[in-house]
Image (cartoon, helix red, strand yellow):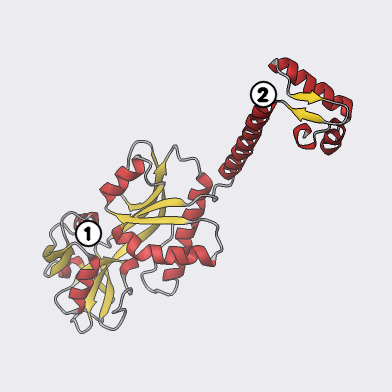
Amino acid sequence: AVARERHFGRAASSCFVSQPTLSVAVRKLEEELDVTLFERRKSEVTVTAIGKRIIEQAQRILEESDLLKQIASEGIDQLADPIKLGALTTIGQYLLPKLILTTHRSQSRLRIIPEENSKLVLQNRLKKGELDVVIVSEPFSEPGIETTPLYEEPFLLVLPIGHPWSNRKHIPFSELRLESLLMLSRNHCLRDQIMSFFPTLRTKNESPSLETIRHMVASNLGISIFPKYAINTGSYADNLLTSCELIEPSPSRRVLLAWRKSFTRPGAISELASLVKQSVSEKLKDSEPNKIPVIGA
């Protein structure tokens, strides 16, 4: 203030202190630094060369102090920064569009940077801090990783319209095992989950993509098993494809949210989990039967 006003009286007024108080404070600072900051004359105060350098440095320190306060306030506001979200391809492909839409509709301030990948890649990127949180399916257990369940997703049999089973509501495995199914290739965890329920299942025409399998089923090349969330999406919808429940057993997967225990934004995790559950509920609220149970909703 003294450097700006070039006058102790005006500087004191701008700081809402008395002139003697300001003069004593400046003199004490000069004594502590062992320099003269100002040349004092009756009508004006002039900043010395060393005083100019010190004042410039002090200004930078004040600005950095303000920046620290701003960063700290962003830490308190856990939705201030985007969250880097990874998802299994067989989940993210169908969940992310609805999740982004739900985020906008609910006017949430959470911003999502999405990524789809395999479970192994997501696991490694999460541990390295390249992702903040991932959406995966069980099993998913890693040291230093926290998880919370989101929803239970049944697996349904997908059939072309006109198949002999297309009007049935339930198919037991005793009938299914007589068929050869279109299936994901062997490096997919979704395939492993399906095969864990039906270890003697016969497969054919393996593909790395659920969408390719969808095209093949629509082309009447066979039948397949899909997660419920992937049903009735894409160009075919109900025109060429139908689905029915599998029973004895009734297969499903549990979908989880996973993050590092050291992640410092639990508020963002909570907001994301709530939005995912809302997205699943909204997408499937009219999908009866086979509605997906949202965990903790």
Amino acid on which the number 2 mark rests in the picture: Ile
Q: Which of marks 1 and 2 is in front?
A: 2
Q: Horizontal placement of 60 versus 283: left or right?
A: right
Mark 2 or mark 1, which is nearer the start of the sequence? 2
Give the CA distance from mark 1 to mark 2: 76 Å
The image quadrant where one finds the N terminus is top right
Q: Horizontal placement of 82 versus 218: left or right?
A: right
Helix, strand or loop for disc 1: helix
The image shows residue 92 at horizontal and vertical percentages of 35, 60
Disc 2 designates what residue?
A: 50
The image shows residue 251 at horizontal and vertical percentages of 27, 61
The image shows residue 89 at horizontal and vertical percentages of 29, 59
The residue at the point 87 percent across, 31 percent down is 43
Determine which quarter of the picture holds residue 287.
bottom left
The residue at the point 37 percent across, 50 percent down is 134
Q: Horizontal placement of 149 versus 105: left or right?
A: left
Q: Residues within 10 Å of mark 1 (few under 14, many from 20)?
A: many
Residue 280 in sight from this viewpoint: no
Helix, strand or loop for disc 2: helix
Amino acid on which the number 1 mark rests in the picture: Ile
Q: How crowded is mark 2: few (under 14 residues within 10 Å), some or many (20 or more)?
A: few
Residue 231 in sight from this viewpoint: yes
The image shows residue 177 at horizontal and vertical percentages of 13, 66
In front of the other: 50 or 24: 50
In front of the other: 23 or 82: 23
In front of the other: 272 or 76: 76
**Looking at the rendered structure, which numbered label has been put on residue 194?**
1
The residue at the point 88 percent across, 27 percent down is 42
Picture layout, residue 234 above or below residue 30? below
Determine which quarter of the picture holds residue 116.
bottom left
Picture layout, residue 265 above or below residue 197? above
